[in-house]
Amino acid sequence: MAKDLKSKETKSEALDPLDAFLCFAVYSTGHAFNRFYKPRLDALGLTYPQYLVMVLLSAEDDQTVGDICEKLFLESNTLTPLIKRLEASGYVTRRRDAEDERIVRVSLTAQGKRIAKKAACVPAQTLEALDLPAGDLAELRRVLITVREKLQAADRS
């Protein structure tokens, strides 16, 4: 009888082995987000990680590299080259902190502020494309943050 049920399953109804993995759903969704964001950010000369730095600096300018690393869950050896490319593009400036020269502070330039303002429409475009109820989006965000926090805690133990 099980064989009969299986033979009636269409390929689209069969559970792909990868679909059983939560991590694959998150991974493949991340790729879908990247494909969606890429043309929009390419038009501004930004990569997604650079865009995130610009968003952070737009919300609160003159942040330390350490603070940005913490907020983006990146190591400084990953973030520093990214910030140097933003600086070479004329979007940010870097300077040593006046009180502690070991600390590097990052600020948007006037050109960076213009680009950040142009990029501000991308989240609304994303929400429009998703076309999901606000409550579902809020719940999804809450669950994803909880998953991230639990995995980080498990990684530390």
Image (tube, helix red, strand yellow):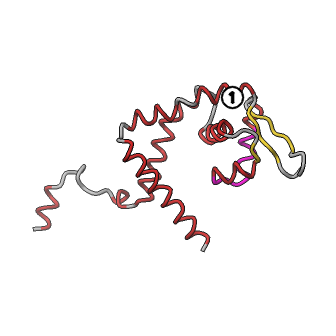
Residue 130 image offset from top left, x and y in percent: 39, 38
- Residue at (83, 50) in percent of width and height: 103
Locate residue 61: give its quadrant. Answer: top right
Q: Amino acid at mark 1?
A: Lys
Overall secondary structure of the magenta section? helix
Measured as percent of width and height from the top left, residue 119 is found at 58, 30
Q: Secondary structure at mark 1?
A: helix
Magenta run includes residue 17: no
Quarter of image, res 75: bottom right
Q: Position of residue 121 (x, y in %)?
A: 53, 29
Q: Which residue is pictured at 45% across the width and 42% down the height?
A: 32
First to last magenta residue range: 73-84
Q: Is residue 114 above or below residue 58?
A: above
Q: Residue furthest bottom?
A: 157
Residue under circle 1?
113
- Front residue of 20/94: it is 94
Q: Is residue 4 left or right of residue 86?
A: left
Q: Position of residue 2 (x, y in %)?
A: 14, 67
Find residue 91 and report its image quarter.
top right
The residue drawn where x is 59% and y is 26% is 118
Q: Is residue 82 magenta?
A: yes
Q: Nearer the viewer, residue 8 or 98?
A: 98
Q: Crowdedness of circle 1 by 10 Å Cα count: few (<14), some, many (20+)? A: some
User: Is 123 placed left or right of 113 in the picture?
Assistant: left
What is the number of callouts on the image? 1
Q: Is residue 12 left or right of residue 2?
A: right
Quadrant position of the N terminus in the picture: bottom left
Residue in the foreground of this view, choosing between 16 and 118: 118
Quadrant for the C terminus in the image:
bottom right
Left or right for 42, reference 104: left
